[in-house]
Image (cartoon, helix red, strand yellow):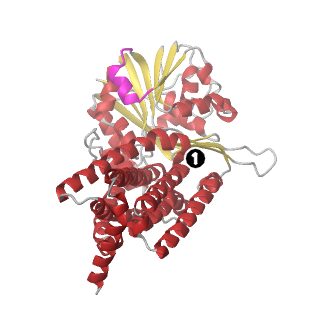
Amino acid sequence: MAAWQGEHAAARADEALMDFAGRPRIARAAVLAAVFVCAACGLVYELALVALGSYLIGDTVGQASIVLGVMVFAMGVGALAAKPFQHRAASAFAAIELLLALLGGLSVLGLYAAFAWLDLYAPALIGTAFVLGVLIGAEIPLLMVLLQRIREQSAGSAVADLFAADYVGALLGGLAFPFLLLPVFGQLRGALVVGAVNAAAGVILVFTVFRPAMSRRAKIGLGAGSVVVALSLGYAYAVAYDFEVNARQELYRDPIVHAERSRYQEIVLTESVPIVSGGVADTRLFLNGDLQFSSVDEYRYHEALVHPVMAGVRGDVLVLGGGDGLALREVLAYPSVTSATLVELDPAVVALARTRPEIRALNRDSFEDPRVRVVEADAFAWLRSAASRYDAVVVDMPDPDETATAKLYSVEFYTLVRNVLDEGASMVVQAGSPYFAPKSFWCIEATIRAAGFGTTPYHVDVPSFGDWGFVLAAPDAPGPALRTEPPATPRFLSPSVLAAGAVFPPDRGPVDVKVSTLLSPHVLEYVRSEWRSY
């Protein structure tokens, strides 16, 4: 009986499509255009989940592997699940597109809420990727049925036409996400816009080409569903900004005074309100949720980072990273400095440090010093073609907790730094916490040695970070002596404090670790395993 009903429904659909007998090319073009648009939307959903995970978690490779693996598996499930609906392919396809548009459009918003308020990001990500994958996988079989109903052709030709449109559409989605949707709409609203496009593509196709083949009940149901999806996406678009502000604030202890998402990362500046009269406000900079400095004690970190490498006469100084200008402030305190070159990947960080009064007060307008030259570039790529030589290099990079930053803690990177050091020059590297992440710290030290440096590790207490370590290094020499010759009395770093910093307790002394390279970023493995416990 069920088989007869399916055959009868297909026969009625074929009869209804006789209106297109004189223009099958237009109908086929409409179906292939829908394939094109749906493929673009599907890839954007995937990329949006990967990008959100990289912003919130920082593990780009891991997030991509989870999302793509789960979604590809789920697409297979969805293709099988679509079999019972082939006799009502048009209405089933429209219903799937409406559901996909609603869930895909709201996916970023929902996952951000799960991260900010519920602490359920990982299971929510897997569940979302699976559901979206099932819906995306169900599209192709139904579209294949619709394509064949317009004009019967060999299976090979139909598959070729369908997948050609699908793959080209995926290319469009892949390019539109980073170059159009993110810059123009942002991540939350960008997903909602794609959801609206997705819904429109499915509904327009069905109600123009396949409308005669649908029952009155199906038309009413799809019309009502379209209204619900449109209203839901429209409302979410209207409240997206307020939602993002509230969700972001949930992640930070202090009030947010500035937030932006640059091409490379999320930048957040917070400032505490002193509880008692005369209290000190605490300004903090976060990049992708990781604390970069606290105004209360940043001088401890930057004095310990810069002053040991500046001992002696240092004319030309190179700062890699440090876009907040705080390490630059310490460098420029030396009258012997004739030039200071700062290489920073994200121009938005430098712009913030140049314009925000809170940061300008901390860095003492270091970027306005005529000795300073700012280069907006990836440090690794810039070093490969650098022709100048420097008397001191300060490496103030973010922690190697993702693939993009792990390369800045590799043998290859330190070898490139070595090539720009002048005779008698030295380098200092911020190396994380020898207390909270000892394997990571000693991996960085071992990696610097493997690049041909003599090393002197040391550590100091920075209350906002805890016990924090650095490595002073000089090429082809034993570990350089720890000493300071500051032009003025530092607030924190004294000869006795520095000497004490060279002493490591037995439970945090050197350990047997692997050297980190581009192809084997062991420092990334150590950072993830150690910091996961805190």
The correct choice, above or below, for 47 with respect to 495 in the image is below
Verify whether residue 312 appears in magenta: no
In the rendered structure, the answer to whether residue 20 lies left or right of residue 260 reads left
The correct choice, above or below, for 461 with respect to 73 in the image is above
Report the residue that reaches farthest toward the right: 277
The boundaries of the magenta stretch are 377-388
The residue that appears at 48% across and 66% down in the rendered structure is 120
The foreground one among 58 and 123 is 123
The residue that appears at 68% across and 50% down in the rendered structure is 255
Badge 1 is on which residue?
463
Q: x, y (%) of residue 258?
A: 64, 42
Q: Quadrant of residue 457?
A: top left
Q: x, y (%) of residue 502?
A: 43, 37
For residue 240, say whether it is visible: yes
Q: Quadrant of residue 72?
A: bottom left
The amino acid pointed to by label 1 is Pro
Q: Quadrant of residue 529?
A: bottom left
Q: Dot 1, how many residues are within 10 Å of its Cα: few (below 14), some (14-19), or many (20+)? A: some
Q: x, y (%) of residue 292?
A: 54, 41
